[in-house]
Every structure is written in structure tokens, then in C-alpha cells.
Image (cartoon, rainbow, N blue to C red):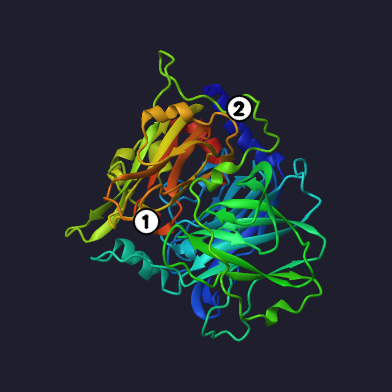
Amino acid sequence: MRFLVSVVIAAACAALAAADDVFATLVISTGVAAPDCRNNTVLLVNGTFTGPTLSFRKDDSVTLTIVNTLDMPFSMHLHGVNQVGTPFSDGASGITSVPMAPHSVQAHTSILTDAGTFFYHAHLKLLDLHVYGPLIVHDDDDDAYAEYDERVVMLSDYWRADLDTLHAGLVDTPAFQFVGAPQAFLTNGKTVAGNCTAAAASFASLDVVAGETYRVRLIGATSLFVVHFRIPNHTLTVIEIEGTWVEPIDVDVVEVLPGQRLSVLLTADQPVDNYWMQTTGKWRAGAPTNGFAILHYDDAVDATTLRTPPALLPAINETVGWQDQFRPANYNDDDASTLPGPATDDDDNDMPPLVLNGTQVTYGPNGTQRRWAMNGTVYEHYHATALIDDVIAGTVATRPAGARPFAYFEVGQVVDIVLQNNVAVNGVCEVHPWHLHGHSFWVVNAGAGDYTPASHATDRTAGAVKRDVVAVYPTAHAYNQPVGVAGAGCGWAKIRFVADNVGAWALHCHIASHFAMGMAVSFVTGEDVLGDPDEVEALRCASGVA
């Protein structure tokens, strides 16, 4: 196995010369924009809110230069890009690199080994509430839908408050202050809310021609809400989830998790007109009601003149397990499992999964703050050094306890992890969308209440979709149900992945405030490889860092 790792790493560095070299630059700055039609000081990417779409080809070697003009540190993550052989380019602050200094420039290289729908976003404090943009990777050799023109729909939630103030309320002030509900749901960075102050404000418009079919890439850039997206009178056919082709399924409503990406086929088969697209919040209270955009048929009335959306459509109930209905493309129920089996011990017995038990805890000298803890440990956002560098140097023990890895995996090890959800301090069980860095996984099981080992019997060993975001649903005591006892189990999900990518990686809830509050762990793949100077030099070379 060690020889294979060496070959892979050497090949990753050599691939820089063999792959198509592509260069892109993102400039991070502050400026005035009106995402919800009220002028506000926001963070911009290349002068716009939201950031521009980056489009590449599979196997491109992309050198991305970040220009940080801010008076604060910054870090950028390419969400869903596994950084195979380029672990220093992941942008997970404090894990794969330290934050960029204010007024600095930094470049990293990523080899895009997978095609699909991705996005980039800030990965420090709550800066990802403003800094994000689409990242699309095409594969000319594997695209059954290449005949269709494409559209991108990026869904996000938006707060008018200062981001530092919101972050301080979560972790720095004596008394805990949650970020609260956002003021708007945005589509491609905009909506129209009441009391507009921007004269040129308008809803986002998705332009189509009657009779044509389009591949619409949906990107879940929300920071708090799971959302439902729909276009009345139009059927949406799901064909891709997080870079994996799936068997087409027709739906009227698409559930989109924070951090999730899906592709749907949309046929403009209605009379020429303007149709309202609607985004609504799910699984928590206080959702904005302004999540509208316009599907504009060519030759219809100018969409920019439309300022008054209709009443919200009838609500769609939340559905535990909505994400579980999909199967890989060309999957046959009679096919044998293509998933690796669980790891086994020396006697060939299945190893039990690692259980990450998420609980909300009171914190601080007077118990007035709140954090999320995994197995009793609150993840500490430690940025003085990067975890991967401490693994290389043998200095992990000098890191705070909450900033150390929860596990070390050998290269090629099959890993099963159970993500256990529990009722929060306020008696409510929340949905948690978990995102894995550096690897993709299969969701092999999920259930209500507390996980028990007997659940192994119902593991899905065939037909699971490879992905990088999973919803741990509240199976009891959700926001619209009777409250429960804090700490009581209220749902779980089990994922399986192969630890085949050397580096230090994050696994965290993709609700930005929960991540800031400590709902995360880190782990290391290939500690022995990272102890070899030659291997490390090759990894740095592939990542484009000294």
C-alpha cells in the first residue's frame, strides 16, 4: 500500500505538467451592494455579489490566486473538490493551511479529478455568508446531457447585519446570541424585499426559450436553512447529486441542503410568459418569505418590470429521508453491491462504526454561552498553525485539545461513521447537513432516535449514491413538534468512505453558525506518509506551495 501511495503522490505532482494548466484569480473586497434591494456594505468577489462562475474541465490543473484586500484574515475552500493529491489546497483554515493575512496574495493548485457541480466559498468565521460563487467542472467524455444548454441557480440566505457582530454573538460575547433568521432568500445573489433603497433592484431571471430543455445546476449556498425549490407548472428531473449521475427522477419540489448541489432537467413546455420560481425554508422557524425569482420565456414581458410576487404557494411538508430516493445512474436492483465492505478486525469480524455524538452544551464561566460538541469535545477553531503541518512536524500534541484529530486512518482503510443527532438545549431537534472534505462517501443507513449496533442489519450495501453532504434529519422533536429533553437522541445517519486521500481533513455541519460553535471534527489520513519528507515535498509540489 505504501508503494501505491508513493506512486499516486508522484503522479499528482507530475500531472501538473501533463494536465491542462488553467489560471483564475478571485479578488476579495468590501463594497456596497443591494442583494435584497437595500444598499448594504458586503464582501465582494471580483467586484460582484455573488462571485463569478468558474468553469473548468475534468483533469484541469487549476491555479487559483486569491487576492485578499480585506483588513482581516481570509481562507477559501473549493467545496466538493476532493483535492486528491493536493491536500494543502483545501482551504480549511487551521486544518490544511493557516488563514491568509490581511492584504495578501496566495495561490494554490488543484487537479480537478471529478466533474460535476461545485462551488467556492470562504472558510473562516462567517465570511461564507457573503463570499461564494459557482464552480462547474465539465467532462466531455462522460456527459449524457451535453446536448442541453445550462443554467446555474445558486440559492442562499442573507443577513444585513455585520458579519463580525454575528460571529461574536456566537462565540465571543458573555451571553450567547444566535444569528437569528436571515432577512432574505436570494437566487443568484438577489431578490426584492420591502422598502427598497436600490433604484435598479430586480428579481433574478432565468432566461429560457419555449420548447427547449435545460440542465439547471442548483447550488445550496445557504448558511442556515434547508430549502425547497420549485417552479410551478414545470417538472424538474433530478439527474446529478454532488458530482454523481443518478437515475432520473421527476419531482415538483427539490430539497436542497446547505452545501449540496444537484442538477435538474427543466423543459420550457408552458405558454410563453414569466413564471415565479420559489425558494422556501424548511426544518426550522422564521424563514423569509421573499425567496422569489423569475423563469423568463423569450418574448415574454420584460422580467425586470416585475416587482410584486404572488402569495407563497401552499407549503410542502418536510420529509425525513427525501434525499434517500436516488440511485446511481444505470443502477439495477439485481446488481451486487459496488460498495466496499466495512473494515474487519484480525478475526475478520466487522469493525463497529465510529460514532460521533453531537450535543449542544452550555459553555463559558457562567454557562451563558452555547456550543456544539462531538463526543463531548467542542471543536476549536485554532489558526496559529495548520493541523497538517503539525502532523508533519510531530507537534500535534501542542495544539489545543479541541483542535486535535479525532481519528487517524491508514491509507485505504474503509471507515464507517455514525452521525448521531440529539435534542438541543432549547428542546428542539435540528437538521444537520454534514459535509466531508477530501473524500466522498456513501450514505449506508439512517434511522430514528438513537443508533444501535443492531441497525447494521439494514445497511444499504447496494444502490447508495456517492456524495459529500448528508442530512441528519430530526426524526422527533423538530421545530414544529413537541419539545424533547436536551440530549435525547433524535435521529442518525451512517456514512462509509475509503480513506484514500493523504492529508488532514474536516468533517463538519455545513450550517455556518453550528460550525462556528464547534460542530466539527478533523481527522488524518496517512500519518506515516506525512512523516516522509519526500512524500510531503511531492504533495506540496502538487498543491503549488513551497
> Residue 249, how many percent across, how many down?
67, 46
Q: Quadrant of residue 305?
A: bottom right
In the drawing, does residue 96 fall left or right of residue 112?
A: left
Q: Is residue 228 left or right of residue 116?
A: left
CB under 8 Å between discs 1 and 2: no
Element type at mark 1: loop
Residue 45, relative to residue 116: is it above or below? below
Residue that appears at 63% across and 81% down: 307
Q: Report the residue marked by disc 2.
A: 338
Q: Secondary structure at mark 2?
A: loop
Please name whichever residue, 511 or 501, is drawn nearer the observer in this view of the structure: 511
Residue 481 is marked as: 1
Does label 1 or label 2 sit earlier along the sequence? 2
- Above-or-below relation of 458 to 373: above
Give amino acid for label 2: Thr
Q: Nearer the viewer, residue 134 or 383?
A: 134
Query: What is the CA distance from the residue labelled 1 to the residue labelled 2?
Result: 39 Å
Quarter assignment of residue 196: bottom right
Marks 1, 2: nearer the viewer: 1
Tell me residue 456's x, y (percent).
Answer: 44, 28
